[in-house]
Amino acid sequence: MHVPPAPSPADAPSSPSRRRLIVSASLVAAGAALLPWSRMAYAQSPAQASPAELAGFLALSCLLTSRPHLDAALSQRVFVALADGDRNFGFKVRSLADALGRAGITDMKAFKDSAVDKDPDSKALVVLIVSAWYHGYTGTPKSLTSVDDTRFITYTEALMFAPTRDVTVIPTYARAGTDYWAHPPASIATD
Amino acid sequence: MNPQYDADVIVIGSGALGSNAAYELAKLGRSVIMLEAGSRIPRWKIVENFRTSSRKSNFNDPYPNEPWAHTSYDPDYIENTGSFNFKPGMLKLVGGTTWHWAAACWRYLPNDMKLKTLYGVGRDWPIEYSELEPYYQRAEEALGVSGNGDEDQSGQAGKPWPPRSRPYPLPPEATTYMNQRLNERLAKEGYHYIHEPNGRVTRPYDGRPACCGNNNCMPVCPIGAMYSGDMHATHAEKAGVKLLTESTAYKLEKGAGGRIVAVHYKKPTGEDIRITARYFVVAAHGLETPKLLLISGVANSSDQVGRNLMDHTGIGLTMIADEPLWPGRGAVQQGGIFNWRDGDFRKQHSAVKHSMANAVPNLAVTNRLLHKGVVGPELDERIRHDAARWVDVGTVFEMLPEAGNRVTPSDKKDALGIPMLRVNYDVGDYTKAGKVIAKQDYAKFAKILNAEVIEDETGWQNRDHIMGSVIMGSDAKDSVVNSECRTFDHDNLFLATTGVIPASGVINPTLTGVALSIRIADTIHREL
């Protein structure tokens, strides 16, 4: 009788394993300040974030996305996902915040053509952070394969849905019942 | 003494085709065992898997991908050797791939089935449209198809076509505001917009609620308004079919007189089981069905098993139009342009179908803007502006059967030790000639809509419409099954798959597959 080999982690269904990874990384991040270094579970763990660092990242995210308020738990998820595999991420975030401060940018209306906008590394980091908030995931999805480097952050809170929220749906959710789509949205004259 | 059997009929595969065949047989009092390689999971879990997926555009991602039942996007599942990366989005679970299919329910045209006779290319079907028509009707009633019976679906602005014996079971949904506007502007230039008959019910039907535009037909309808094969898997069970999940068929056993006597299947635990029946229906989709025949060494006296593989390999066009149209209100697709569905041009080049997508475009829109470095207040403004005007055209081409386009068992094996798939696939000249025509249309569409073209050179794309791989014909020397979907080599072995389709046309083939499967059930019932 043929006995199949035990599934390796790589064979496991992608969503649950990804979910486990995110949850464990978040827990490690949350508890990081309390843990001695010797007890850190994984060398690659992005667990160095201190409460001050997370608060700084949340404030930076609010500035970059032009939002007065963002969810702190989501902000931590974004930080952990982006810091995974990049031990310098915390340093880069602080440097970006400093650069924005030096340029006097307290509102993104002042960002375009600023010194930060013109610095390729800073601009790339801005886009990376904004992308995570708007897409609701980090990494780059690859088509036609079950393997890529993406990490789930949020679905319904992904900022890309906010500008159209009064007109279309967040897919899987409904809006106004069967055949509502026959009529133009109320905003059509000003769209 | 008469031989004893485990069932009258064993159906391999619990997708829309296998489940409909099994259900029809059970309703007629036959004992049926249905084998399914994958598991059964409820709709709500698939919906939650989607919502928490970081790969929203990957329609396989919310579904189980097990070492013994891979989705087709598992890197090891399909090995490609041709010039095209043939990767249809196939699933293995109860209900099969109609969990994510957008539910287009077209009938072929009478002319589609006489391609060789009328246009001198490809192959004819061995049956005429009129023979299939009653089964189309039954399939539409099974799936709850909403359609407009007043249109000329051949795209020539003529009389209602193809002929119907009865009206569509359900009326069509309202035309979206976007499609009203596109229709108005494109019609002036001679383009015929046709409503797509679809398996989304417009009023409560067979326990399903009316579609209310959750805009997620792919990868999962959250409310079950859209048809999926699990509905008939459940109907079949209630009618007495024994459904065995996580049971992967790997061998059809030949007996005396060229008859198939048993199927062998494996469980993830390693159990290896043999069951017997008087008739066998393989409904394991257009890649797995030929693979099972090849690894079993059956039905291949013609050497055509696995050959003649066709998709409706396509291309795409993305534009930003000059007015707000607001895609994303309603289902993910609703119709398209059918001017090139049928005509004498098919002597020279493939038929062409353009579909206007109606998916909420925010991800694609936002991704593009961020790649361009748009941030700050401009980002929200541009998302709204571009999402309102986003026009996404998906084009498909007719293919011709070519022996070199082929699926065979791979050297790689799954966790059960069963070979996975190897595909060799190239796009032929007939289709390439059709692409030239499609690109001319693209330029006209952009001009009519005064649009900014975002992408009009996508390269060839998968369309997940697997045909030809166990081809139907009238001659045992060049075909795998006859007009009844019965294998020429084995009287009691039928194939319920779109893989039997010998002339692809440009329409999504699932409804035809279900019609043929119901017909298989009738044929077997008569003989039992």
Image (cartoon, rainbow, N blue to C red):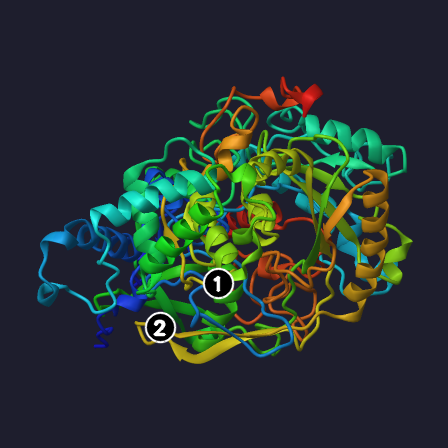
Which of B177 and B198 lies nearest the eye of the viewer?
Answer: B177
Numbered label attached to residue B182: none
Badge 1 and badge 2 in a common chain: yes
Q: Is residue B9 visible?
A: no
Which of B377 and B6 lies nearest the eye of the viewer?
Answer: B377
Q: Residue shown at 59%/61% (left/top)?
A: B499
* Residue A170 locus on image (x, y percent): 48, 33
Task: Give the alpha-carbon distance from disc 1 to disc 2, as whole Å.
Answer: 29 Å
* Residue B483 locus on image (x, y percent): 65, 58
As helix, strand or loop, the secondary structure at mark 1 comes to loop
Q: Nearer the viewer, mark 1 or mark 2?
A: 2
As helix, strand or loop, the secondary structure at mark 2 comes to loop
Q: Residue shown at 40%/45% (left/top)?
A: B50
Q: Is residue B74 left or right of residue A30?
A: right
Q: Is residue A183 left or right of residue B68?
A: right
Q: Residues within 10 Å of mark 1 (few under 14, many from 20)?
A: many
Q: Is residue B252 left or right of residue B518?
A: left
Q: Residue shown at 60%/65% (left/top)?
A: B481
**Sooner in the amino-acid sequence: mark 1 or mark 2:** 2
In the rendered image, the quadrant that contains the N terminus of chain B is bottom left
Quarter of the figure with residue B470: bottom right
Subunit that carries the residue with mark 1: B
Quarter of the figure with residue B308: bottom right
Subunit that carries the residue with mark 2: B
Which of A129 and B149 lies nearest the eye of the viewer?
Answer: A129
Looking at the rendered structure, the kind of residue marked 1 is Asn
Numbered label attached to residue B414: 2
Q: Is residue B108 left or right of residue B469?
A: right
Q: Residues within 10 Å of mark 2 (few under 14, many from 20)?
A: some
The answer to whether residue A47 is above or below residue A97 is below
Looking at the rendered structure, the kind of residue marked 2 is Asp
Q: Which residue is mark 1?
A: B492
